[in-house]
Image: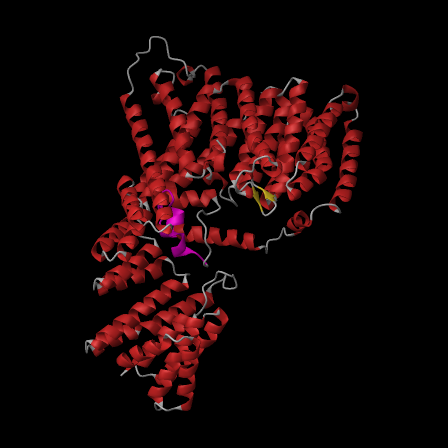
Amino acid sequence: MFFRGLFFLPEQMVALAVVGLFFLIFIVSSRLDLRAIGRTRMELAALLLFGGYLLSTVLAAQLRSALLELLKYGLYLMVFILTSRAVRGPVQRVVALWTILVGLTAPGVVGLFSVSGPWHYPGAIFENKLASTFQYHNSFGAVMATGLVLALGLQVATKPQWQRLLLGAMGALFGLCVIYSQSRGTWLISLVVLAALVILTIRAERSLLVARFLAIGVGIVAGMPFFGRGLHQLSYWIWLGWLIAGVLAAAVTYVVEMPTIRRHYGAVATALVIIGIAASVILVSRLPADLVARFKSLSLRDVNVIERFAFDIDSLKMIAASPLLGYGGGGWFAVYKRFQSYGYTTRLGHNNFLQTWVEGGILGFAALIFMWYWFFRALFPRDSTKSATDERAVMTAVAMAGGFLGLHSIIDFDLSLGAISIILWALFGLANGCVLDREVKAGHGRRFGLLPAAGAKRSFPVLPVLVYALAVALAASLFAGDRLQNRALAEYNAGQSPLAMSNMLLAARVDPLNSTALTLAAQMDEQAGKYDIAYALNSRAVKFDRFNSVILTTQSRMAYRLGRGDEAVWAARQAVKMEPQEELRYETLANLYVTLGKYFLSQGNTQQAQSFFQQVPTLGAEMAQRGEQNYFKNSVNALPPDTSAMEMYEGQSLLALRQWKEAETHFQAGIDLGVKQQDRHLIAENYMWLGLALQKERSQADPEAQAALRKAFELQIETVSNYTEALKWVK
């Protein structure tokens, strides 16, 4: 379940097939009445959320991604329905939470094995941060914090003492993993959620909960030196750290639960706090430097905080552009470069609420908000104070675990990982089960059971079976397309071009919406000299992925090669529009303007040539204005006001317009920027054009012109032939 966090298609396909099969079995056996789905407000919200993503596929920015996201939400919806129907009553909910906890323990243990051996999971450790099977330390930290919250909450509802002690040991593992995941957002949100857990726990159990938490904390503090040493040395010390933490947490839990101790909780809690503070002071001096630095780096000025701020601003821009239907599933990634504040690279918006609005439109966003609202209402109804202690404890644990995932999803992309979303939707299902239980008590819940009603007619559900078959077929098609595409790329890199071309075309046939396979196949055909076929393939890619600036740039090049000048300009302009924070798009369009201007000059059409040359300085001014006015202009990836290549193209256009002085200024600026960029080729080219401009303004034998040309030829001998070509159109 947790393999790579179910983020990638192969794992998602397996999960969809298995859960869908169970769902189908319940329908076929008449244990699940589809007509009864949607009777609770949570179920209605879940259906509307799925409907929002379904509706948004109509105008999806990338249809393939939209269908893939729709399959994922279908998976979550089935998990939600199955959990809410199958898990009924406080006892079954405790069993379900234990199942989730055991599942959460698995990636923690795998992470320890990856550190100590004998085998290592790829990506389990990232820059001394524990990531385990999730391969992303923030998501792993969030999952471990969820486990810690559930372990603490379950201790209140668990009767056998050995189970409570086991929960204390599991809590120690979760806590150590949270700390050494080095996820700062997880650290902060954990404090808030744990405080809320204490406050919402009934008063009679509150002091005991605090004592148990302190017991786990004592174990964590004792185990940290060994755990941290094992992580940094990749040794078995990490197991010793957990062993010490787990045993001590269980032992202290046992002590604080003793009747004699319970009568003096105030003194015990004070003693534990004093011991914890003293141990922490000693521990801080022995903590690894990277962990200490991570603690100290908590700041609103941190680059990651600023980046999240930019993501949210850009998400709001996307929402403003398409607030009703959104851009379809996966639409955030498809369109973000058009709206981004600076040239960052990401796949996800790091804010599940805003990303849902971007992709699922206003319907999806509203449904998500209502889902969360009714989730908490289901767990804390108006008469919740009358609930039994165990039942109230279970509901509180479910609420706080879900609340943690919801809060963390505001600052990270956890819920884009299928494994974490499945956990959340299972928690949603447990909350919905509470509502169904109350319906049963009120005498309206007969239809909600998983057992067939007496005398019910069993007819074979043709439509659900057909939908399941189509969903599996679609997932298999997407999966096969990905596999064939990756195989073709590996073959191409190995020099097996014909075989690579064959597999890439097969990928495009098996997965016809795969724009990446189409454009890669087009580029392979282009290199083989099959320009018409390449153009046709890439044109299909543009239709399926119209916001992709790379595909548009490729289309511009291919269209120009075939003499389709107007289409080449349109595609290049669209590429700039779709990725306005990338200087390469401006440079490509500027180069195309200059190239077309040269062509029309060679044809004697001076007026048409000048119209293209005049657009280059305008484009350069647009790039400069966008770069200067950017709030994030000091970012490493911010769009620069100008580049060496842009200065060269602007200089060439002004040279063609016989504005010698202005052209020389741009070429000199291009030289200076080329030195900063350490680009020998652009420095040489700008020197060559500077020499040519000086010759046109003054004379062929001008000393400054000759010096500039000599410098160009010294830097790059190929500049000699470029100079000869330049003379032809400048004349």
What x and y, as percent, mark residue 653?
32, 76
Quarter of the rendering containing residue 100: top right
Q: Is residue 564 left or right of residue 328?
A: left
Outermost residue toward the front in this view: 495
Image colouring: secondary structure
What x and y, as percent, mark residue 613?
29, 75
Residue 10: say if magenta. Answer: no
Residue at left 37%, top 79%?
Answer: 689
Q: Quadrant of the C terminus?
A: bottom left
Q: Is residue 11 above or below residue 313?
A: above
**Between 728 and 617, the one nearer to me in the picture:** 728
Residue 321: say if magenta. Answer: yes
> Which stretch is magenta?
320-341
**Between 244 and 212, the one nearer to me in the picture:** 244
Residue at left 42%, top 42%?
Answer: 356
Q: Is residue 69 above or below residue 649?
A: above
Regarding residue 632, the answer to whether it shows in the image is: yes
Q: Is residue 376 above or below residue 715?
A: above
What x and y, as percent, mark residue 725?
29, 77
**Between 244 and 202, the one nearer to me in the picture:** 244
Regarding residue 381, the answer to whether it shows in the image is: no
**Between 507 and 218, the one nearer to me in the picture:** 507
Quarter of the rendering containing residue 213: top right
Residue at left 77%, top 44%?
Answer: 281
What x and y, as percent, mark residue 309?
51, 53
